[in-house]
Amino acid sequence: MPSVQHSPAPNCKGQLRDSQSTKLKLIKAALNAFTTQGFDASSTRGIENAAGIKRGLINYHFGSKAALWEASADHLMSITEQELGAAVKKVETLEESQRLHAFVHAYVTFCADHPELNRLMILEGTTADWRLGWLLDRSVRPWYRQVCKVFKHAKTLGLAPQMDPHHFYYVLTGAATLIFSNAAEAEALSGRNPLDPDAVAAHAEAVADLFIPVEKSR
């Protein structure tokens, strides 16, 4: 006899939506705290206050501050994979002579949209602890391999400077992110908001042009 499928009662659906909404509010507030203050300096009470959530719900939904950190980092990494993954697929449809430039341009644009990613990596990349290990295993190592692969291919074709892919990774990361991570400083120096769309496009073009081989740029 086939089993009868029961739909969740309306009040259960509402409770589920409320729970998911609460968790997302906590994740977003935690991500802001962890990427500006760091893990140790961020308090669960401060995160709950920033989220507008009553005291104790971090432990209820996540169990601990460490578990909340993992959930918020995973949220950010999922966004990163989705957006950069789509950009890489688009780059792969271009002619090979255009791919490295387009790849760099897309990455800089992404960094402007998500400066919190670089802030998180700056804070967590200085100490070899469990959080850095988690980030490396979750997303950073696969992305590192992807960046090196793109650069190695362009270099083989004579379409990239003669530098080690490892150095390319860090030159690209620094050039693509610092102006957006330090947006207040950049605006104070230039009088221009670096997050304005035209400024983002100009910076993306400038960074991409750095990796045109000298003989190709002449």
Image: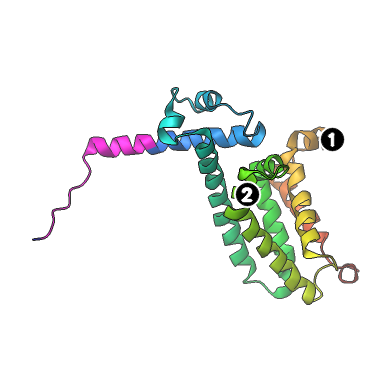
Residues rendered magenta in the picture? 2-19
User: Within 10 angstroms of label 2, few (less than 14), some, or many (20 or more) residues?
Assistant: some
Q: Residue at x 72, y 51 (%)?
A: 201
Q: Position of residue 76 (x, y in %)?
A: 56, 46
Specify the label residue 130 is tagged with. Answer: none
**Image side of residue 202 versus residue 56, left or right:** right
Element type at marker 1?
helix
User: Is residue 3 on the magenta stretch?
Assistant: yes
- The residue sitting at 64% across, 58% down in the picture is 141
Residue 189 is marked as 1
Residue 57 on the magenta segment = no
Q: Residue furthest left?
A: 1
- Front residue of this view, candidates 186 and 170: 170
- Residue 185, given in percent of the width and then of the height, sits at 79, 34
Choose top left, top right, bottom left or bottom right for residue 114.
Answer: top right
Q: Name the one closer to the observer, 96 or 59.
A: 59
Location of residue 132 with respect to 137 vertically, above or below: above
69 to 111, vertically: above or below: above
Q: Which amino acid does label 1 sit on?
A: Leu
Q: Is residue 194 above or below residue 172?
A: above
User: Camera-side residue: 47 or 52?
Assistant: 47
Q: Name the residue under label 2.
A: 133
Report the quarter where the C terminus lies: bottom right
Instruction: Name the residue at 77% across, 61% down.
Output: 166
Task: Decide which of tag 1 and tag 2 comes sooner along the chain.
Answer: 2
Q: Please identify the quarter of the rendering in which residue 73 is found.
A: top right
Could you say where residue 18 lies in the image, as x and y percent from the top left?
36, 34
Of the two numbered discs 1 and 2 in the rendering, the one whose residue sits closer to the viewer: 2
Tag 1–tag 2 contact (CB < 8 Å): no
Q: How has the structure been colored for display?
A: rainbow
